[in-house]
Every structure is written in C-alpha cells, then in structure tokens.
Amino acid sequence: MAPAPASSGRIRPWLVVGDLVLAALWVCAGALVKLFVYSVLGLGGTPEGEAAKVSLSVVYMFLFAGLESLTGGASYNPLTALSGAVASHGGPALYLFTVFLRVPAQVIGAVLGVKLIRTAFPQVGKGAVLSVGVHHGALAEGLATLLVVMVSVTLKKKEKGFFMKTWIASIWKMTIHILSSDSTGGIMNPASAFAWAYARGDHATFDHLLVYWLAPLQATLLGVWVVTFLTKPKKVVDENKKKK
C-alpha cells in the first residue's frame, strides 16, 4: 500500500478506470515475480529466492507508486482508496463514490487480471490461502493492515519526497507481509484476495469475508482515526480543550 497522492476531497470519475487497470496489473505483477523467481531462477524455498522476491517486489511497488501519482490517485487496493476518502474529509458523496464505484472497479480489475495471468501461465498457482483458524487469521490480517495503514497515512502528511515516502512504505509493507504470510498470505488487499479466491471458488465463504474483507476494512478505519487523532494540529487540540 504505497502512499498515494493526498486526496483533495473531490470526486474524480476517471479514477474508476485507473483503479480497474492498476488492480489488474497489480495481481499480474505479483504473480509474474513469483513465477520468475520460483520457475525461471529455480530459487523456490531458498533464502536467496525470498531475497530476490522481496527485491523485485520493492521495484514494482515503486512503479505502481509512480502510476498512482501520474493518474492523480488511482489505486490497486480498496484500502488505499478508502483510507484516502476518509482522511480527506471529503464528505458522504466522496465516501459513497469510493465504496460503490472505485472499490467494485478494483475488484473487477483484479478478477480480470487473475483470469488473464492464469490463462497465459497456468502454472502460476492459485494465490495465498488461509492456513490458520478464521479468528486467528482475522486478527493477523487486521493487525497487519492496521500497521501498514497507519504508516501510509502518516507518510501522506509528511513533507518527504516521493522516493523517501515510497521507500519507507515499501520496506514497511514487505516486512509486515513476510511476518503475516504464513497465516493469511499477508495480502492486505481485499480486491486481490477476492480475485484469487474467486478463481479457486471459495470467494463467498464466511472465512474469506471475515479475514480478507471485514477485518482489514475495520483496521483501515481504525488506522485513519488513530493517525488523525495523534497528528491533530496543536491549535485544534487547544481549541477543543477550551471548549470543554
């Protein structure tokens, strides 16, 4: 979840198309990296393979961060779009636009991307699956999402340059991904999770909805609220104290 450009709180219809395209490209990029490392390089299950996968993942995270910036805020991850809408205080209209147009576009894009990559490379696999109990998985995915969202939203508020923001966000996300990959796959992206689950046929199960949708969505809202509360300007804090 790269720190996308700060939202101005305006509804921008073209983002729907950008979201669809980026979501499709994102699942393809992730699958191609694994295919390259495991099948082409033959480094599956080795420390060298994990290092290569992380390095390539950071590279394409920079690429997608650049695409997000060029498109004015399009994203491959519903959590990024949702956190941006909430943090921008754009009002109910922006929130509804994000939930009912942008998020479905991202899901459709991810589904199309998975279908495309599996058609072109059938050996690519079926994506990450839940390997622990549903409540354990929901806690792990929710906590991972919370940590990533808090850093991402905080970086949006900082004056650091594009490279530094993207570098910090990428390394932090890969760290959390590695720590949570054994339990839930460390996806932290409901659209990607749904697309692979749809390909397997288990997208409508309670476990999937709780672990890969409800938990990360709640964690996203909590993360935005925590960062907003902790980074509230001093003047606003003083005014609130005077009112009380």
Image (cartoon, grey):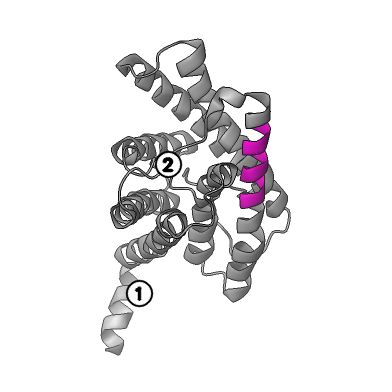
**Which mark, by number, is residue 236?**
1
Q: Please say if 23 is above or below 235.
A: above
Residue type pointed to by label 2: Val
Q: Position of residue 162 (x, y in %)?
A: 49, 38
Residue 113 lies in what quarter of the image? top right
Left or right of 183 on screen, residue 82: right
Residue at horizontal 45%, vertical 51%? 156
Question: In the image, is residue 112 part of the stretch drawn in magenta?
Answer: yes
Q: Earlier in the sequence, mark 1 or mark 2?
A: 2
Residue displayed at 54% across by 44% down:
192
Q: Residue 32: x, y in percent?
A: 56, 25
Query: Disc 1 marks which amino acid?
Result: Val
Give the image location of residue 238, x and y in percent.
Answer: 28, 77
Residue 28 point in image, percent of width and height:
60, 32
How far apart, in angstroms, are the residues tagged by discs 1 and 2? 45 Å
Magenta stretch containing residue 90, yes or no?
A: no
Query: Is residue 67 shown above or below 4?
Result: above
- Of badges 1 and 2, the one in the foreground is 2
- Please determine whether, in this image, residue 47 is positioned above or below residue 192: above
At 38% across and 45% down in the image, what residue appears? Answer: 130
User: Which mark is on residue 129?
Assistant: 2
Callout 1 secondary element: helix
For label 2, the SS is loop
Image mark for residue 49: none
Assign the C terminus to one quadrant of the image.
bottom left
Q: Report the side of 206 relative to 28 (left or right).
A: left
Q: Nearer the viewer, residue 195 or 142?
A: 195
The residue stretch that appears in magenta: 107-117
Q: Is residue 170 visible?
A: yes
The reply to whether residue 70 is in sight is no
